[in-house]
Structure formats: structure tokens, C-alpha cells
Image (cartoon, grey):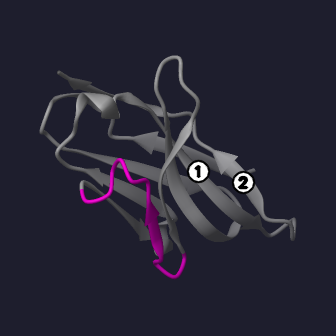
């Protein structure tokens, strides 16, 4: 059983920064892609950023140039450095990963429980 645990959320003022972390644990063979999604109250979950095992990255237009995703493959951990935060960034941020386990060949998508990010206007 593989789990993702996010941390680093909190309350900040507009223009400040936060760094989110997501650590995967369990019987993991490999993690192909790790990423971040977010969900604001009353809205659907939306893509923020992701990174592959080969360090290819992708960002939503709304965060491009402000957020940076990185990955430590040895620790099965992904980070999201969020700079110049805006009130529009307020949401629950969820970690996501496509993983392979020793017991199964199928790539399985898993989600963390989320961490709250609130940016005051």
C-alpha cells in the first residue's frame, strides 16, 4: 500500500512564499510522474504542475513563472516552491503520483489528503 503525505501549507500574505512537500511511502518500485493539483471552495480540482522521473516539467498558465516543481527521486518526494502568492492561489493542494509497486505491474494513480494554502488579500 502506497501513501502520499503533503505538508507545508499555511496562511500567508499576498506576495509571500510557501514550499510544499509530498513524500511517498510504501512498497514502491518506481514513480513515473509526481504532481500537484489544487481545489478551491466550490470549484473543481485543477492541475498545477507535474514532473517526470526524467525531470521534464509542466505548469498551469496561472502559476507559470511563480511556482517551481522539483523532485528527489531517492526520497520519493516532490516539492512545490510557490513564490509571489496571490489570493487566487488559495486552495487545498493535493499531491498526485503515478506509481509502480513490486506486487503489481499496472501503473496506479494515487492522491494525498491535501494541505490548505490560504493567501490573504
- Would you call the spot at circle 1 few (<14 residues within 10 Å), some (14-19), or many (20 or more)? many
Tag count: 2
Image quarter hosting the C terminus: top left
Magenta segment main secondary structure:
loop
Using the rendered view, name the quadrant where residue 64 is placed.
bottom left
Q: Is residue 120 left or right of residue 44?
A: left
**Label 2 belongs to which residue?**
109
The residue positioned 31% from the left and 31% from the top of the image is 88
Q: Position of residue 2 (x, y in %)?
A: 69, 52
Q: Is residue 120 left or right of residue 99?
A: left
Q: Residue furthest front?
A: 61
* Sequence order check, earlier mark of 1 and 2: 1
Q: Nearer the viewer, residue 106 or 50?
A: 50
The residue positioned 53% from the left and 41% from the top of the image is 46
Q: Is residue 104 left or right of residue 10?
A: right
- Would you call the spot at circle 2 few (<14 residues within 10 Å), some (14-19), or many (20 or more)? few
Q: Report helix, strand or loop for mark 1.
A: strand
**Label 1 belongs to which residue?**
96
Q: Report helix, strand or loop for mark 2.
A: strand
The answer to if 41 sits in the magenta stretch is no
| Relative height, residue 13 to residue 37 (above, below) | above
Q: Are marks 1 and 2 in contact (CB under 8 Å)?
A: yes
Q: The magenta stretch spans which residues?
A: 53-65
Q: Position of residue 48 (x, y in %)?
A: 45, 49
Using the rendered view, name the quadrant where residue 98 is placed.
bottom right
The residue positioned 39% from the left and 50% from the top of the image is 21
Q: Position of residue 39 (x, y in %)?
A: 50, 31
Amino acid at each position: 500500500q502506497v501513501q502520499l503525505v503533503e505538508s507545508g501549507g499555511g496562511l500567508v500574505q499576498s506576495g509571500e512564499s510557501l514550499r510544499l512537500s509530498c513524500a511517498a511511502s510504501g512498497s514502491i518500485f518506481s514513480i513515473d510522474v509526481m504532481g500537484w493539483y489544487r481545489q478551491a471552495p466550490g470549484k473543481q480540482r485543477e492541475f498545477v504542475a507535474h514532473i517526470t522521473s526524467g525531470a521534464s516539467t509542466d505548469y498551469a498558465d496561472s502559476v507559470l513563472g511563480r511556482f517551481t516543481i522539483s523532485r528527489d527521486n531517492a526520497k520519493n518526494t516532490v516539492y512545490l516552491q510557490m513564490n509571489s502568492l496571490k489570493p487566487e492561489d488559495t486552495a487545498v493542494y493535493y499531491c498526485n503520483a503515478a506509481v509502480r509497486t513490486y506486487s503489481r505491474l499496472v501503473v496506479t494513480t494515487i492522491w494525498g489528503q491535501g494541505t490548505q494554502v490560504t493567501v490573504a488579500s
